[in-house]
Amino acid sequence: MAYCPERKVVTQMAVVAVEKRKKANVWTREILSRAIRDSLLKLDPRTLYRNPIMLIVEFGAALTSVLYLRDLVSGEPFDTLRFEAQIAIWLWFTVIFANFAEAIAEGRGKAQAATLRKTRTQTTAQRVKADGTLETVPSSALRKGDIVVVGLNELIPGDGDVVEGIAYVNEAAITGESAPVLKEPGTDIRSSVTGGTTVVSDELRIRITANPGETFLDRMIGLVEGASRQKTPNEIALNILLAGLTFIFLMVTVTLQPFANYAGNLISVVVLVALLVCLIPTTIGGLLSAIGIAGMDRLVQRNVLAMSGRAVEAAGDIDTLLLDKTGTITFGNRLAAEFIALDEQGNGRLIEAAVRSSLLDTTPEGRSILDLAKSQGFGSLVATLDVSEGDFVPFAAETRMSGIRRDGRATMKGAADAVVAATGRPAPAAYTAAVQRISSEGGTPLGVIDDGEILGLVYLKDTVKPGMAARFEELRRMGIRTIMVTGDNPLTAATIAREAGVDDFIAQARPEDKIARIREEQAQGRLVAMTGDGTNDAPALAQADVGVAMNSGTQAAKEAGNMVDLDSDPTKLIEIVGIGKQLLMTRGALTTFSIANDVAKYFAILPAAFVVSYPVLDTLNIMRLESPESAILSAIIFNALVIIALVPLALRGVAYKPIGAGPLLARNALIYGLGGIAVPFIGIKLIDMFVNLAHLA
Amino acid sequence: MTLSDTSFLIVYVAVLVAIARPLGLFMMAVYEGRRTLLHPVIRPLEAGIYRVAGIDERREQGWRAYLFALLGFNLAGFLLLYFILRVQGSLPLNPENLPGMKPSLAFNAAVSFTTNTNWQSDGGETTASYFSQMVGFTFQNFVSAAVGMAVLVALIRGLSRHSANTVGNFWVDLTRGTLYILLPMSFIFALFLVSQGVIQNFDSYRSVTTVEGAEQVLAMGPAASQVAIKQLGTNGGGFFNANSAVPFENPTAWTNLLEMLAILIIPAGLVYMYGKMVGSTRHGWIVFGVMTTWLVIMAVVANVAEQSGNSNLADAGVTQDAGDGQPGGNMEGKEVRFGIGQSTLWANATTLASNGSVNSMHDSYTPLGGLVPMVNMLTSEVIFGGVGSGMYGMVIYIILAVFIAGLMVGRTPEYLGKKIEAREMKAVMLGVLAFSLVLLTWTAVGAVNSFGTDTTNNLGPHGFSEIFYAFTSGAANNGSAFAGLGVNGTFYNVGIGVCMLVGRFLFIVPVMVIAGSMAAKKRVAPGPGTFPTDGLVFGGLLFGVIVIVGLLTFFPAISLGPVVEHFMLRDGLLS
């Protein structure tokens, strides 16, 4: 294994510590006032029909209002009118609260979309005509294949590939990252540019790759706005359940009248409507779409764009993660991990020589040798050693060494066999043994010589980013297996895999190995997620259930995946899975809560409805609510208020703890199941006390 | 509860648990076509049937073909039985010269026996000839039970297979269930019953002079063979109108215990078989545990309610405390031989298991005691339930529980490695909806029309209970009668008939849809993130879903019937 310093730019990636983005406040005045306006606009039945549960509530509200007006005209007693008016008001509020939940969830996305849209409309482009001259056209006139020239401080008019020129581009409009990115042609990844970003140096010639309306920016606007939001498969199934329950409770309410008739009792339509609204799952019905939008929004906040809600849902179901080793699990550079001197006394000399040979070395390997020396108590040596009079010998393919030469004395480090050859003598047995050990462990041995004498070795290895092992452990507890993909030989791969704590690895991987492995996992019934950026990743990204393309990646990769990470951070996948799970959990928790709520509502309303014919049923009034009117009113008020009270939870999501499905289920069943039974008993009782205190009934 | 009642309950449950595994394993072997002890005797017969009927036993059907075969078989069975009942007067084996039944009664009875309900608007011995009983009813007693088991087996195949498009062969499942399971068990059980004194003859009815000197006509007939299958096949249609309260059907303490066990053993064995065949015995036991817990709770509630008696009687100076030679409590409508413990336990077993045979009269129970059988049936018979139908009905609730709560672990819901999606939810909701729709609607119609209320024995909430119970019994395919309601009119015959049809087939159709769509799905590998269906938490959730989704629908109806009656009785408002 030859010493081969890779000249790669060290990516400045915050690994485990997730970038603490400034938490955008949901409750800004602007968003709030827009949400209030929208929640009134959404009362339009033509909008509301998409939410059948709320449509029924609105129907009930309208019916109650009409009955109130009728009774007002016919001069019913004050008590009846007061009761009916309040029921009608609270029914309207129930719908408005549900609309508000949806509007507030959409609010942030809408604000974001407005900013993005501004970027789009102002763009014009310099198109290259067939004869080579330029013409100015609006960016909306650009078609696939057009070539445009974009100069300094101009907006790039559409998605495309750089065909000529090298320039820095500011992508802050899309990614929020202010540091400009270098773009040049022919480099697969760095040649792709996104419309709406700005050239901040030089000039680029770009071939447009997307028609207007299909660009990344357009898709992004559609997504954050929620305009292109479609119901996900699980949402559809959940809606069937909710519609079924609603129909059942509609039947229960309708047949209650004949039952009451038999008992010689007539229940007023207002009370029946109140009972119906209390029983149908209004809580989850009102919050369901807000939960979905908020889930998408949480992704957007982490700079991830999901192309469909389906993908977010699939993220929660992921069983297997395919992660590239380089740049994701490891830093991607071989870094010094250990000094191995040939004998115990020689340790100091070895370190000094290694430091000396590296002081002027700017490669990551050289830097890491200095870092390692510092961490072993040689900090002062690194700080004081003066090599200014020596000549730095950079690494060359022929010598495979680098170091410093002064007055004919060379202090060099390099490939294990190259340095031995440079001494002209056979290597000591201890040296050969150490080289073998390092190689067998998948590391790279770096020989160090000073003045023709072999001092020892530096053990270079591919270093796992700190905290990755803990992260994978967490994933395992979530029930997710991680597979590391690397071009390394099996030996090296195994070492890294062990160190990082991944469950499996693919060594010497070619792009087709990746896709084969994905198919294999899927055949066993697992859902697979992966990240990728290159064009050759595209098929695998498309095959995976969740394919996260890096924004820095090629257009092909971005189109193949179903999510794009604007930060181009492969470890983001782990967060994406968490967000998917959180979305599903929130949905489940609120459904359970909503259905469990019904128990208390029955106990509040039934005794009240039959107070005339069966006063003995008051035994069921276990909350000891004051009067039939206050009982029904309190139940309706609780039903409306609980929607608004749960809006923050719906937007934030239920906290996800990676403790395994069993304990998680026990925990949530306790909080939302049993809690869902208990909370309304307390809530309705408290409201009833207030209602009576305020003489509302 | 008295000590003897408590120990009886414990013994009963213990025997049930002990039988479940061996019986489940045996039935599993039968449906998988493996060799069993009965092979030498029955295999030639089975092969003969296939040859005559031209069935290729290795050829499997898709869920549609399976379902159509099933529906066709049931339709033919219904028509045949309807025809027999209409013309029984001119058929043989009719020593009492009973005439053909009127259309509405024949419709009701034919539906009743084809749907494994065995609701009897008529009294068995007074309207049906021996031919109708033996050829018509008994045949359906066997095959309706076998059909239930066939549906369950098809569902199991759907759940345990993946990427498959067949769920088995209906004709083979039907034949095997009848030949290897129901016939041999009934045969042995009938022999036991005869040994205990259950009658088995073709005599005409006998007149005897009682010790009080009165003349009484005693109905005769081939009872033992009927009783055996009516219990084992959760049919419940008694040979005699008073069912297993009649000494000719249930003469001794042993017959009482074993008849009561016979109600639940096949359903219990099927629960074990289900767990084993879908690949999670633990899951099977958890479901079994949920069912047993329900049984025990309900048995205790009914027992305590009956034992505490009727306050009106107490006011009249009747002692209702248990004492020497005196069972105490409410003994109205109960056999002195069985007392409260064995009567209420039977009432539970029979209403849980869609059996419907009785050894006491539920109408005479205290309001709370009578509430118990009603609640049991309102679960749509999924606690042990009917033969086959109980477990496949339970799967509807399991899927519902998994769907509602499954999301709470952060994955889209899956059951036994299969994703639950829109199609399954449609099927599940259809089943739940149809049951409550038909039951509530007919009760509502009955409650406000004179043709519904005229024939109730009682007024007020008890009368309402009688109407509600009748339709519940029909829709749940139970067939037990609250009694106290004249049901041989056109309204009840047709209404209950419709309830029975809906309760049976609008469960079978969705279940078969689920079987088909689950079979075609890929299986998701289980992992630590998978929703656990084999733990106590799941058991609790399942229990909760049955109570909340299953029972909340009927909370108003229950409140207006037994509950309000209980409060009125308590407050001395009933006299």
Image (spheres, coloured by chain):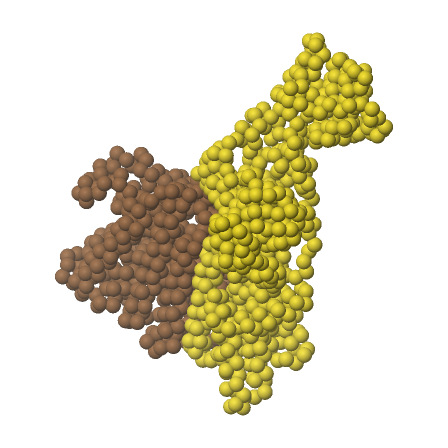
Chain colours: A yellow, B brown
Q: Residue at x 16, y 62 (%)?
A: B87
Q: Residue at x 26, y 51 (%)?
A: B69
Please name whichever residue, A210 or B283, is drawn nearer the observer in this view of the structure: A210
In this rendering, position of residue B74 left or right of residue B460:
left
Q: Residue at x 56, y 31 (%)?
A: A486
Q: Mark yes or no: residue B96 visible.
A: no
Please name whichever residue, A591 or B224, is drawn nearer the observer in this view of the structure: A591
Q: Position of residue B454 (x, y in %)?
A: 34, 76
Q: Mark yes or no: residue A520 visible.
A: yes
Please name whichever residue, A517 or B510, is drawn nearer the observer in this view of the structure: A517
In this rendering, position of residue B237 left or right of residue A116:
left
Where residue B457 sits, quadrant-wise, is: bottom left
From this view, report whether residue A466 is shown above or below residue B106: above
Total of numbered circles in the picture?
0
From this view, report whether residue A617 is shown above or below residue B49: below
Q: Position of residue A522 (x, y in %)?
A: 46, 40
In this rendering, position of residue B186 left or right of residue A393:
left
Q: Position of residue B188 (x, y in %)?
A: 30, 43
In this rendering, position of residue A376 left or right of residue B450:
right
Where residue B491 sits, quadrant-wise, is: bottom left
Q: Residue at x 61, y 54 (%)?
A: A155
Q: Position of residue A641 (x, y in %)?
A: 61, 69
Please name whichever residue, A116 or A435, is drawn nearer the observer in this view of the structure: A116
From this view, report whether residue B152 is shown above or below residue A607: above
Outermost residue to the top: A425
